[in-house]
């Protein structure tokens, strides 16, 4: 099983839309992928799902989180780890979670994160690049 930290834009796209990110849902449901989150990442997922543009009720948000995500994630307590300076300070939580959990990848569509390429032993890659790795792994 591959463990990875998924940026918010990736998770929202996977859960709500068709297209390449939606393949991640079947990957985590079939135990080929284990999304790793910290409390602050999960809070951000919930906050973004509540954006008016998605037109989800609180009950629908709860259902998506409880049925489509929580049963499949690994939660870690992110340690106060020094991270490189990032253009968007909100991105630090993904780096801290990945380093704390010892995962190999952060999957993102965010140029601010993607521009980092690598932080310590963690590679920051696009959904397309991650799906290629995931689909070639036995």
Image (tube, rainbow, N blue to C red):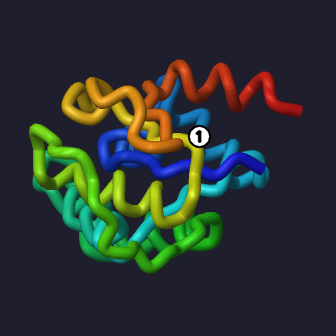
- Asked where in the image residue 65 lies, by quadrant, the reply is bottom left
Q: Position of residue 74 (x, y in %)?
A: 59, 69
Q: Is residue 12 above or below residue 60?
A: above
Residue at image position (34%, 54%) is: 94
Q: Is residue 131 above or below residue 99?
A: above
State whether residue 123 appears in this view. yes
Classify mark 1: residues with Cα within 10 Å, few (<14), some (14-19) or many (20+).
Answer: many
Residue at image position (31%, 41%) is: 9
Q: Is residue 62 above or below residue 54?
A: below
State whether residue 17 appears in this view. no
- Please state if 79 lies on the left or on the right of 84 as rendered: right
- The front one of 108 and 48 is 108
Q: Position of residue 88 (x, y in %)?
A: 11, 44
Residue carrying label 1: 24
Q: Position of residue 29 (x, y in %)?
A: 70, 54
Residue at image position (64%, 65%) is: 72
Task: Find numbered disc 1 in the image and state the secondary structure of the residue it sits on.
Answer: helix
Q: How many marks?
A: 1
- The front one of 56 and 95 is 95
- Asked where in the image residue 23 lies, by quadrant, the reply is top right
Q: Is residue 5 above or below residue 134?
A: below
Residue at image position (26%, 32%) is: 110
């Amino acid at each position: 099983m591959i463990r990875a930290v998924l940026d918010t834009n990736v998770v929202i796209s996977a859960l709500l839309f068709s297209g390449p990110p939606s393949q991640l849902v079947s990957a985590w449901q079939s135990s080929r992928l284990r999304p790793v989150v910290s409390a602050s990442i999960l809070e951000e997922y919930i906050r973004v799902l509540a954006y008016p543009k998605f037109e989800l009720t609180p009950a629908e948000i709860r259902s998506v989180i409880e049925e489509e995500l929580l049963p499949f994630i690994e939660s870690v307590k992110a340690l106060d780890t020094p991270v490189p300076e990032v253009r968007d300070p909100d991105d630090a939580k993904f780096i801290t979670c990945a380093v704390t959990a010892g995962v190999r990848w952060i999957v993102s569509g965010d140029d601010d994160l993607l521009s980092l390429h690598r932080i310590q032993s963690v590679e920051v890659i696009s959904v397309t690049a991650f799906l290629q790795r995931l689909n070639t792994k036995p």
